[in-house]
Image (cartoon, grey):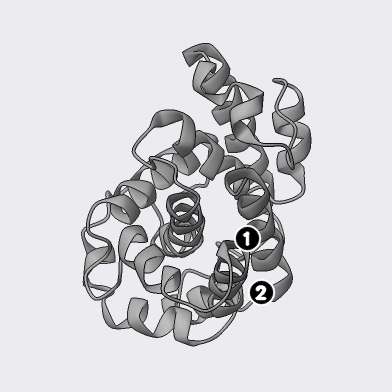
């Protein structure tokens, strides 16, 4: 079994995010397609975002993914499949929210904020350390002016936090790599965790 280290987390994050914004895993929608689908929903933008978060809590959020597990087979050897699966599913939701908020998900700054969203409530403290307050308009916080050094600092903090999260009793017990389906479903069906992550992304990306 692959050891979970901060470097492993970073590799898994980058792999999952690239898949999310460029075509998705075979058999699934990417973030752009997901955003387009929910943008057609009823209500205002915030209502549409909440619909994505609710949908992520249902089995329908995993059904398409589980039919396209062929993409997971092509994973780099150093990344555990269930870790990549969880990050892919959650980052796809986060990126879709960012897209609906008018952000360029291919921008490194937006990518970093997406990673921070995965930390849920802990994101508030991570970002506060670099002068970003969740809940205020990102434009007012000078997100576009974030330096490469600050982005690197945030990513390091996120990596450490996720290592703690996934390495213990977090979203999914990575020691249970088999069965993969059970691991993926268990992670996505963790409604409390998914709601917190979704709400964090909404507060960061929706003005």
* Residue 164 vertical placement versus 26 (above, below): above
Residue drawn at (40%, 63%), measured in percent from left and top? 35
Task: Name which of mark 2 and mark 1 comes first in the sequence.
Answer: 2
Q: Quadrant of the N terminus?
A: bottom left
Q: Observer-nearest residue: 37 or 192? A: 37
**Horizontal side of residue 195 vs 92, given as left or right:** right
Q: Observer-nearest residue: 88 or 175? A: 88
Report, in whole angstroms, how far the alpha carbon at label 2 lies from the one at label 1. Answer: 12 Å
Residue drawn at (43%, 68%), measured in percent from left and top? 39
**Horizontal side of residue 139 vs 131, given as left or right:** left
Q: Observer-nearest residue: 74 or 3? A: 74
* Residue 101 vertical placement versus 125 (above, below): below
Q: Quadrant of the C terminus?
A: top right
Spot occupied by residue 105 in the image (x, y as percentages of width and height): 39, 42
Quick one: label 2, few (<14), some, or many (20+) residues within 10 Å? some
Residues at circles 2 and 1 in contact by the CB criterion of under 8 Å = no
Q: Mark 2 or mark 1: which is in front?
A: 1
**Horizontal side of residue 191 vs 156, given as left or right:** right
The local secondary structure at tag 1 comes to helix
Spot occupied by residue 114 in the image (x, y as percentages of width and height): 52, 44
Q: Which residue is mark 1?
A: 198
- Is any atom of residue 78 visible in this view? no
**Horizontal side of residue 154 vs 88, given as left or right:** right
Residue drawn at (70%, 30%), measured in percent from left and top? 127
* Residue 165 vertical placement versus 116 (above, below): below
Spot occupied by residue 72 in the image (x, y as percentages of width and height): 28, 64
The local secondary structure at tag 2 comes to loop
Quick one: label 1, few (<14), some, or many (20+) residues within 10 Å? many
Q: Which residue is mark 2?
A: 190
- Is any atom of residue 109 visible in this view? yes
């Amino acid at each position: 079994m692959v050891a979970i280290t901060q470097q492993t987390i970073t590799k898994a994050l980058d792999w999952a995010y690239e898949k999310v914004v460029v075509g998705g895993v075979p058999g699934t929608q990417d973030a752009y397609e997901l955003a387009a689908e929910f943008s057609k929903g009823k209500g205002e933008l915030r209502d549409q975002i909440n619909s994505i978060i609710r949908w992520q809590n249902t089995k329908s959020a995993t059904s398409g993914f589980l039919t396209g597990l062929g993409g997971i087979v092509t994973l780099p050897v150093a990344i555990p499949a269930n870790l990549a699966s969880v990050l892919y599913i959650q980052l796809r939701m986060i990126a879709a929210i960012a897209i609906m908020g008018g952000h360029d998900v291919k921008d490194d700054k937006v990518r970093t904020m997406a990673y921070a969203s995965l930390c849920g409530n802990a994101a508030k403290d991570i970002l506060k350390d670099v002068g970003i307050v969740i809940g205020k308009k990102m434009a007012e916080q000078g997100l576009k002016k974030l330096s490469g050094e600050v982005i690197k600092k945030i990513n390091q903090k996120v990596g450490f936090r996720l290592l703690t999260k996934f390495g213990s009793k977090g979203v999914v017990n990575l020691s249970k790599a088999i069965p993969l389906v059970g691991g993926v479903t268990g992670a996505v069906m963790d409604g409390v965790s998914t709601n917190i992550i979704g709400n964090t992304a909404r507060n960061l990306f929706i003005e």
